[in-house]
Image: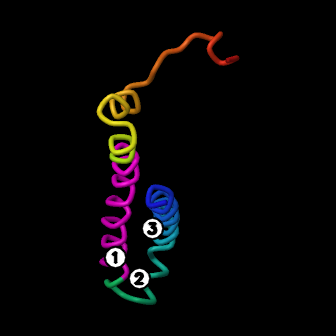
């Protein structure tokens, strides 16, 4: 659940960053220099969320499957075409 929430919030925060950055002159006219400061703070939070999403994914694989499961999650497996049909 935490993995999905961090991914959802990270995606939403990236959207907010794009909207804030795209209309920054308007926001600066309304809020002044606080708009830039808040844009930078939201950028830091977004960066943390984006990095925590795959981190939670790998930690979940480590806890659920052990060290071998962690390794197979981290490194892609190259399987043959025939194994898709079983």
> Which quadrant of the figure has residue 28?
bottom left
Assign the C terminus to one quadrant of the image. top right
Mark 2 to mark 3: distance in Å?
11 Å
Mark 3 to mark 1: distance in Å?
9 Å
Horizontal side, residue 80 vs residue 13: left or right: right
Callouts 3 and 1 close, C-beta under 8 Å: no
Instruction: Residue at 36%, 43% (x, y): give it.
Output: 58
Instruction: Residue at 34%, 52% (x, y): give it.
Output: 51
Query: Coloring scheme of the render?
Result: rainbow
- Mark 1, residues whose alpha carbon is within 10 Å: few (<14), some, or many (≥20)? some
Q: Which label's residue is closer to the chain start, 3 or 1? A: 3
Q: Residue at label 2?
A: 28
Asked if 81 appears above or below 41 in the picture, the reply is above
Mark 1 or 2, closer to the camera: 1
Q: Which label's residue is closer to the chain start, 2 or 3? A: 3
Read off the magenta span: 35-58
Query: Residue 2: x percent and y percent?
Result: 44, 61
- Mark 2, residues whose alpha carbon is within 10 Å: few (<14), some, or many (≥20)? few
Instruction: Residue at 33%, 41% (x, y): give it.
Output: 62
Instruction: Residue at 33%, 28% (x, y): give it.
Output: 68
- Numbered badge on residue 76: none
Q: Which label's residue is closer to the chain start, 1 or 2? A: 2
- Mark 3, residues whose alpha carbon is within 10 Å: few (<14), some, or many (≥20)? some
Q: Secondary structure at mark 2?
A: helix
Q: Residue at label 1?
A: 36
- Numbered badge on residue 21: 3
Asked if 6 appears above or below 57 in the picture, the reply is below
Q: How many marks?
A: 3
Callouts 1 and 2 close, C-beta under 8 Å: yes
Query: Residue 76: x percent and y percent?
Result: 43, 24
Mark 2 or 3, closer to the camera: 3
């Amino acid at each position: 659940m935490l993995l999905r929430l961090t991914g959802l919030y990270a995606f939403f925060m990236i959207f907010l960053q794009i909207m804030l950055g795209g209309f920054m002159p308007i926001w600066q006219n309304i809020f002044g220099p606080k708009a830039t400061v808040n844009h930078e703070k939201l950028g830091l939070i977004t960066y943390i969320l984006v990095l925590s999403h795959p981190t939670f994914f790998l930690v979940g694989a480590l806890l659920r499957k052990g060290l071998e499961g962690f390794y197979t999650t981290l490194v892609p497996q190259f399987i043959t075409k025939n194994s898709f049909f079983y």
